[in-house]
Image (cartoon, rainbow, N blue to C red):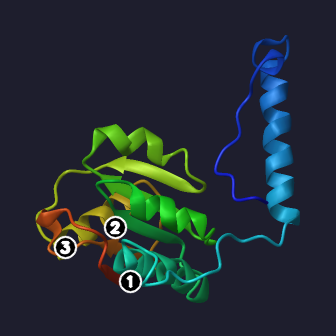
Amino acid sequence: MDGTDAVMLSGETSVGQYPVQVVQTMARIAEAAERASSFRGKEHKPLEDVAERFISDTVCYYAAKMANTVEASAICTLTFSGHSAQLIASFRPQSHIYAFTANYKILNKLSLHWGVRGFYYDSMESTDATFVDITTQLKAAELVRAGERIIQLASMPIEAKGTTNTIRIKEVL
């Protein structure tokens, strides 16, 4: 309810006699709290005079809003720093968040953010080709299906690895 992305065990609970039951109980508590809570994440729009990454933050804000509006099954973001995936997660969209990166250092960290699943991806030829490629990968992994809508985010030009400045709604074919 306070926007926490993860919980962890510490002290006796992490080394006790019933570690599996402890983790199962924690998972049930976290899931119940998310279901019972009216909290859906940050609700405020980025402010131009406050945010260093105003354009990127605005694109991420509206990606979460659009995903809920069009009932997208997924938000797919290409990221090098992990910032866009982390920010989208903070808005708690109802969609899955799939983050693609060529940065091994942040790949595992991505999965620590609420609702984010990270994928290694380094074949960024062009924005259009990359969007097609990641959609094909998600479809092959049965994470998205034909007929579903997805939101795709990237930086253009893609090879510059800049901040997120592009958003697209796509129906999976």
Between 105 and 111, the residue placed more toward the observer is: 105
Q: Earlier in the sequence, mark 3 or mark 1?
A: 3
Q: Secondary structure at mark 2?
A: helix
Q: Residues within 10 Å of mark 3 (few under 14, many from 20)?
A: some
Quadrant assignment for the N terminus: bottom right
**Callout 2–callout 1 Cβ contact below 8 Å:** yes
Quadrant assignment for the C terminus: bottom left
Location of mark 2 (residue)? 135
Give the CA distance from mark 3 to mark 1: 14 Å
- Nearer the observer: mark 3 or 1; the answer is 3
- Nearer the observer: mark 2 or 3; the answer is 3
Q: Secondary structure at mark 3?
A: helix
Q: Residues within 10 Å of mark 1 (few under 14, many from 20)?
A: some
Give the CA distance from mark 2 to mark 3: 12 Å
The disc placed on residue 170 is 1
The residue located at (54%, 80%) in the rendering is 67
Q: Position of residue 2 (x, y in %)?
A: 75, 58
Residue 137: image quadrant is: bottom left
The residue located at (50%, 79%) in the rendering is 61
Residue with the most extreme front position: 49
Q: Position of residue 11 (x, y in %)?
A: 78, 18
Give, as a three-letter code, the residue at label 2.
Thr
Q: Earlier in the sequence, mark 2 or mark 1?
A: 2
The disc placed on residue 127 is 3
Q: Is residue 7 visible?
A: yes
Q: Is residue 166 left or right of residue 122?
A: right
Give, as a three-letter code, the residue at label 1.
Lys
Give, as a three-letter code, the residue at label 3.
Thr
The residue located at (61%, 81%) in the rendering is 44
Q: Is residue 25 left or right of residue 140?
A: right
Q: Earlier in the sequence, mark 2 or mark 3?
A: 3
